[in-house]
Image (cartoon, grey):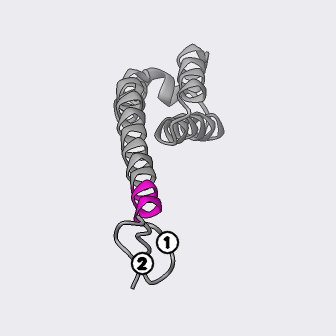
Amino acid sequence: MRPWRGHDFRNEGGVTAHVLKAEFVMLRSSLIGLVALGVLAGAASAQTKMDCSRLYKDFWEKFDREKYTKISAEQLAGISRMALRAYDACQAGDEQDAKELFDRLGRLQY
């Protein structure tokens, strides 16, 4: 048994209580930092998130029925694929690509 007055507080593994406390504080600080980072990242993504479903539905609602009957099946399939690519890009968080694709779709001449 070691003397108490010597301040040699070692546990069975030979680690001092001071070292254990420092490790605990570092671990706790790291966890708090990670939680804070997650909260900030979530808040930032929620602020800029586009309404992908609304954009996709709005495109098809604005698609003129008259144009629909005049274009070929191949053109309609191409437009549909592009709209789905825009929707997928939006869902994946690539807002720049999604906005670009939806803008292109809006400017298409049939």
Q: Quadrant of residue 22?
A: bottom left
Which residue is more in the foreground, 106 or 35?
35
Which residue is more in the foreground, 108 or 40?
40
Q: Which residue position holds label 2?
A: 11
In what element is the residue under mark 1? loop
Side of 62 relative to 14 (left or right): left
* Magenta segment: 17-24
Q: Which residue is drawn at 63% across and 34% down?
A: 75
Q: Residues within 10 Å of mark 1 (few under 14, many from 20)?
A: few
Q: Position of residue 21 (x, y in %)?
A: 39, 58
Instruction: Identify the image quadrant of the N terminus.
Output: bottom left
Which residue is more in the foreground, 25 or 85?
25
Q: Which residue position holds label 1?
A: 15
Q: Quadrant of residue 101?
A: top right
Q: Where is residue 13 in the image (x, y as percent from the top left)?
A: 49, 81
Side of 39 relative to 94 (left or right): left
Instruction: Identify the image quadrant of the C terminus.
Output: top right
Q: Position of residue 56 (x, y in %)?
A: 42, 32
Q: What residue type is labelled 1?
A: Val
Q: Is residue 39 visible?
A: yes
Q: What residue type is labelled 2?
A: Asn
Q: Do the residues labelled 1 and 2 touch (CB within 8 Å)?
A: yes
Magenta segment's dominant SS is: helix
